[in-house]
Image (spheres, helix red, strand yellow):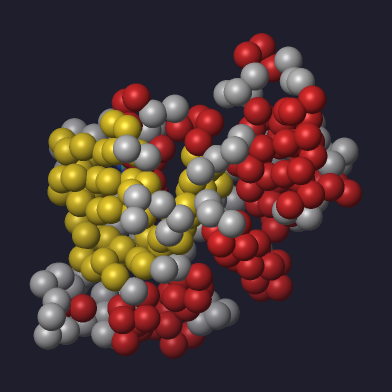
Amino acid sequence: MATAIELEGVTFGYTDTPAVEDISLTIDKGEFFGLVGPNGSGKTTLLKLILGVHDPDAGDITVFGEPIEAFNAGSRIGYVPQQSSRKGDTMPVTVREVVAMGRFPHSPFTRFDETDVVLIEDAMETVGISELSDRRISRLSGGQKQRVFIARALASNADLLALDEPTVGIDAASRDEFFTLLSELNRDGITTILIEHDLNTVATYADRIACINRSVHYVGSAADFIASDGHVDRRPDSDVRPLYADGTAGYTDTVQNSPDT
Ligand code: ADP
């Protein structure tokens, strides 16, 4: 299978202490890949390295076969950030205007032609927000806003969606609908990388997961990870390390209490 993302020995730190260390991972084209790990374990940092926001201190990142330095992430990777970190929600922009931003990397001086307009309208249709197109983004619910950001990525013809806990603060019904949409888009071919704290959600939607805590502790199916109850190092065929010194990954509570935690 063709490779979407390849990381080799990637280390990066904001300070002298690395936030992620010696990460090697391969994500296949078309894969739905989950990134899990405790708070502060480096998941967002890893996603930002893949987006080219930070340059690695060591190691190499290849995106769709190109070194990240040569890759135009603006047009090919759609990023859906966490709700809480989103700035600009109060800006007086409409849904259509936000989705249209997806065409900026393709349309110099933002002069849209007919193709741009069709792509913008189609993207809104695909995620089910056409009837909201003239509404201000600040008036939307959390779930609707996240759909707008997906539509922006689709308008951009993104090959890859990178989502950082996209449904935090969204009600359960909208969350299920949102993940169903992601799943459909993935089935249509878009590679998906999802940071998600709820392991049951990851197990439902992701083909594979990586569990990180500064370095990679597990890569494989979410079902196997859950079955190991976090004791990933005790599987007979495993050479991965536990997240914590007691051998657990710290996920037992999350699994038992889901989906409401
Ligand atoms: P996660 O997404 O798993 O919660 P992060 O990637 O956000 O983890 O953070 C990993 C580590 O890097 C944490 O120790 C965090 O405090 C630190 N960190 C994250 N962003 C910054 C930043 N902008 N400046 C300094 N340290 C940061």
Image spot of residue 34 (x, y percent): 41, 62
Q: Is residue 1 left or right of residue 173?
A: left
Q: Is residue 41 left or right of residue 119?
A: left
Q: Is residue 50 above or below residue 111?
A: below
Image spot of residue 134 (x, y percent): 87, 38
For the N terminus, the image quarter is bottom left
Image spot of residue 248 (x, y percent): 22, 79
Q: Is residue 181 above or below residue 150?
A: below
In the image shown, does 87 or 121 lie closer to the viewer?
A: 121
Image point (79%, 25%), residue name: 114
Looking at the rendering, which quadrant does residue 30 occupy?
Answer: bottom left
Looking at the rendered structure, the number of numbered marks drawn on it comes to: 0
Q: Is residue 140 above or below residue 156?
A: below
Image point (66%, 12%), residue name: 109
Image spot of residue 187 (x, y percent): 56, 62
Q: Is residue 46 visible?
A: no
Q: Is residue 144 left or right of residue 2?
A: right
Image point (44%, 87%), residue name: 256
Image point (84%, 47%), residue name: 130
Query: Extreme top residue here?
Result: 109
Q: Is residue 255 visible?
A: yes
